[in-house]
Image: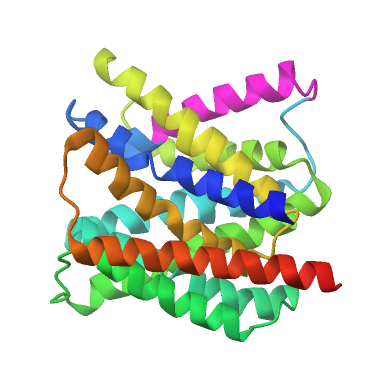
Amino acid sequence: MRRGYLLVFLAASMWGTLGIFATYIYRYGVDSFTMVFWRVLFALLILGSYITLFLRENPFTRKRLSFYAIYGLVGVFAFYTLYFYTVKISSVGFAVLLVYTAPAFSVVLGRLIFGEPITTEKAISLLMVMLGVILVAGNVDFNVGFLPLLTGISTGFVYSIYGIMAKFGVRDERPERVLFMTLFFGLLYLAPFAKFSVPSGAIPYLLGLAFFPTFLGYVLYNHALKEVEVSRASIVATVEPVVAIALAYILFGEKLSLPQIVGAILIVGASILVHSRGVEEEEIR
């Protein structure tokens, strides 16, 4: 159990590097869909090599192809399409904020699909996370129309579906292969919207984006879901924006406001609460 929570925390820490790599990549004029396409392509090459050379298995499988086709459509293509469209019609801060409605959906879906109990500690942690994310997001303009609100909430819902489908996938398959097949189909959906050439200077950052927040992040998270409830994992994973603002402070000298610091404390506190109660419940069983 403790190992599972550690894996979630490490996965979220890897995801927190995404904004750093994206900042450098955007400087080369790479558009969002192209960035995601190359991120997924390089991650597939890294993951495929890892499965083949170290796990000594075939990364491809013919089992449950329809499942992986849907998973790639929802967890990769739909998520990024909704996310970047929300950014386009509103702001990055607003889009990021609504992505983290995902834990609320995960708690409800975890109850409906897996029978995970909605406990008092989960409800408190969820409130702490939502308030913390609002504070960490900073000065977000909420004066938006219905469409950004709809696409933003839809992004959070789709993000929660990733965890639900991963939970199903890792029950009967190695987590690395689940990720490989999901990314493979996601790449097929992304290809028509991406450019197949990028400036050479952007490639090292694209490789970093593929390795840290994609390969490492999702492999760690998929492994964690073999041990941790999807609702708890989703709440703990909200430490991602805390890592992101910490890295922005260290690498780019971005200032941290008092509300952001308070928000970070709330998010970390919620993660600790969920972890400690989860371990206690496991020990009681």
- At horizontal 16% and vertical 39% (from top left) the residue drawn is 253
Residue 205 screen position, x and y as percent: 33, 24
- At horizontal 46% and vertical 30% (from top left) the residue drawn is 210
Q: In the image, which residues are magenta?
A: 37-57
- Quadrant containing the C terminus is bottom right
Q: Is residue 278 visible in this depiction of the protein?
A: yes
Q: Nearer the viewer, residue 36 or 260?
A: 260
Magenta-span inclusion, residue 44 = yes
Q: Is residue 94 visible in this depiction of the protein?
A: no
Residue 184 screen position, x and y as percent: 58, 36
On screen, residue 27 above or below 117:
above
Colour mapping: rainbow
Q: Nearer the viewer, residue 252 or 45?
A: 252
Magenta-span inclusion, residue 121 = no
Main SS of the magenta part reads helix
On screen, residue 111 versus residue 249, left or right, reads right
Q: Residue furthest bottom?
A: 120
- At horizontal 37% and vertical 40% (from top left) the residue drawn is 18
- At horizontal 17% and vertical 29% (from top left) the residue drawn is 27
Res 247 quadrant in image: top left
Q: Nearer the viewer, residue 79 or 135?
A: 135
